[in-house]
Structures are given as structure tokens and as C-alpha cells.
């Protein structure tokens, strides 16, 4: 299942990039990090939210600097 999800993420990223869109790939940050997810495994936990927020903030700041 994980292999299929990683492959699909790669295909999605390729599609975005081929259309000139930004794609933020967080797969490696979250894969295997069970503490980043709530007990039921779908939504992020309190430990996972800052990881995602930090990544998005970094990427958005880079886009902002690029567009100035």
C-alpha cells in the first residue's frame, strides 16, 4: 500500500510540475512517523501539525521571495 501511495505521489508531482504548478512533497517527512498522525491514522496529531505548518511556511516564503 505504501509503495502505491508513494508512486501516486510521484505521478501527481510530475503532473503538477509539467503544468508549471508548484508541488510540495511531504512524503518523506511523514512516512513511518506514526506520532505525526492521530490514533486512527488519518488526520495529523498535535506533533504532526507543526511539521506540516513549518514545511508549508518555508515553501510559501520561497514562492513569495521568487515572485517579488
Image (spheres, rainbow, N blue to C red):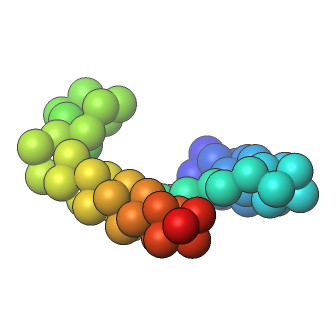
Residue at 89 percent of width and 57 percent of height: 18
Determine which quarter of the picture holds residue 25: bottom right
Out of 56 and 28, give the one closest to the viewer. Answer: 56
Task: Locate residue 9, reporting x and y percent.
Answer: 67, 52
Q: Which quarter of the image is occupied by the N terminus? A: top right
Question: Across the whole image, how many numbered discs are drawn on residues?
Answer: 0
Question: Residue 5 vs residue 63: left or right?
Answer: right
Determine which quarter of the picture holds residue 24: bottom right
Question: Is residue 1 placed above or below 68 in the rendered structure?
Answer: above
Question: Is residue 30 placed above or below 65 in the rendered structure?
Answer: above
Residue with the most extreme front position: 68
Q: Is residue 63 visible?
A: yes
Task: Locate residue 52, reporting x and y percent.
Answer: 31, 53
Residue at 40 percent of width and 65 percent of height: 61
Out of 47 and 22, give the one closest to the viewer. Answer: 22
Task: Locate residue 36, reporting x and y percent.
Answer: 23, 51
Q: Is residue 36 visible?
A: no
Question: Residue 16 vs residue 2: left or right?
Answer: right
Task: Locate residue 50, reporting x and y percent.
Answer: 18, 54
Residue with the most extreme right position: 18
Amino acid at each position: 500500500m505504501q509503495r502505491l501511495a508513494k508512486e501516486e505521489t510521484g505521478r501527481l508531482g510530475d503532473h503538477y510540475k509539467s503544468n508549471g504548478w508548484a508541488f510540495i512533497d511531504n512524503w518523506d517527512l511523514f512516512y513511518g512517523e506514526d506520532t505525526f498522525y492521530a490514533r486512527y491514522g488519518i488526520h495529523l496529531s498535535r506533533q504532526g501539525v507543526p511539521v506540516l505548518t513549518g514545511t508549508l511556511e518555508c515553501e510559501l516564503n520561497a514562492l513569495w521571495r521568487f515572485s517579488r
